[in-house]
Image: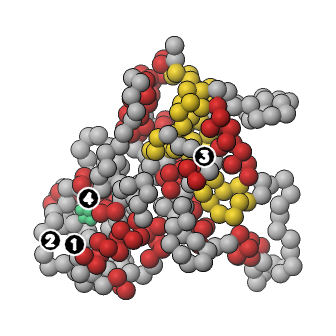
Amino acid sequence: MPVKIAGEWLNSCSGCEIAILNLGETLLDLLPELDFVHIPVLMDHKHYGQLGDKKHMDIPKATVGLVSGGIRNEEHLEVAHEMRKKCDILIALGTCATHGGIPALINSYTNEELFDQYYHTESTDPGAEVPGNGLSPLLDRCYALDEQIKVDIYLPGCPPHPDQIGGAILALLKGETPELPFRSVCDTCPTIREGKGKVKEIRRFTEAPQFDPEKPVSEMRCLLEQGYLCAGPVTRAGCAGNDGEAPRCISARVPCRGCYGPVRQNGNQLMDMLNALVTNGIDISSLPDRNSLLRFSGAHNRLTAKGGM
Ligand code: SF4
Ligand code: SF4
Ligand code: SF4
């Protein structure tokens, strides 16, 4: 009998759902064994009945729940609890769900500061009311899923590589628990590391790193050793997929921005990176913006409006 799957997207952009579609032919092969009972971004199944005629949220029961996005407002919270109630195994899909992702950058500001920035500008009426009619009230900040509901499996990535989504579904079909290896992006990076002549200050990316575009990335020197702030040492591996390719950004000759979140689920990319830089003799005062190291993992009180981390 096909395994029932339900999906939901909360404080998210739909990129994680596109990553499911990017499974391509693997998805076609898997489809006879899967029964998608609810996944709003990909099929028309409404929360309160197709005609809006139901009084209570109507997400069907499923064996596996895929939830992308963190939790930012009361609607997200209600949907997240409903998914938890209806799904036997709940997967946090993507870094927004596992660590807050880009939307959790807002945690550096209070809601009042946010509304002031957008609705009380020099060109608007300073006394104007913040529009709220019919909108779900915001929570105090953006939460990762596991701050509000129990999560069984974490699939980070912005978005997760389709190989990992496919691997997780296949493992579940076999009755196994999918497990991601605890490795860093550096562990999957083929660049040349000489470990000598290390830089003392971080270089801005306005100046291109040195590489020969005619040669493979394996002949480029490590971007961190060239002085660029590459978050590879403190970011979980996965974006290279299963085919032994280089990490995505490194293939494009740009530093890793940390989109898979910390190597360990409860790690802190900012503190880990500061440690890595100090260990390598790099002056951390040359970092232009420390909080940007948490641009994908600002939930779990890592980023706070009081400037904490
Ligand atoms: S993890 Fe990235 S791709 Fe997925 S919902 Fe968040 S922003 Fe979009
Ligand atoms: S720091 Fe960046 S460029 Fe260097 S090995 Fe790690 S991921 Fe590759
Ligand atoms: S190299 Fe880093 S930022 Fe780029 S896709 Fe991979 S994990 Fe994400």
Q: Is residue 72 visible?
A: yes
Q: Does the residue labelled 4 lie within 8 Å of ligand 2?
A: yes
Q: Amino acid type of disc 4? A: Cys
User: Of all residues shown, which one is farthest toward the front?
Assistant: 150
Q: Quadrant of ligand 2?
A: bottom left
- Kindly identify which residue carries mark 3: 149
Q: Where is residue 160 in the image (x, y as percent from the top left)?
A: 43, 46
Left or right of 209 in this view: 8:
right
- Kindly identify which residue carries mark 1: 225
Left or right of 148 in this view: 135:
right
Which label sits on residue 195? 2
Q: Amino acid type of disc 2? A: Gly
Helix, strand or loop at mark 1: loop
- Kindly identify which residue carries mark 4: 186
Q: Where is residue 298 in the image (x, y as percent from the top left)?
A: 52, 64
Q: Is mark 2 within 8 Å of ligand 2?
A: no
Distance between the Cα atoms at labels 2 and 4?
13 Å
Precedes in sequence: disc 2 or disc 1: 2
Left or right of 126 in this view: 283:
left
Helix, strand or loop at mark 3: loop
Circle 3 packing at 10 Å, graded few (<14), some (14-19), many (20+), is some
Q: Where is residue 172 in the image (x, y as percent from the top left)?
A: 43, 28
Distance between the Cα atoms at labels 2 and 1?
7 Å
Distance between the Cα atoms at labels 4 and 3?
32 Å
Precedes in sequence: disc 3 or disc 1: 3
Mark nearer the viewer, 2 or 1: 2
Distance between the Cα atoms at labels 2 and 3?
43 Å
Circle 1 packing at 10 Å, graded few (<14), some (14-19), many (20+), is many
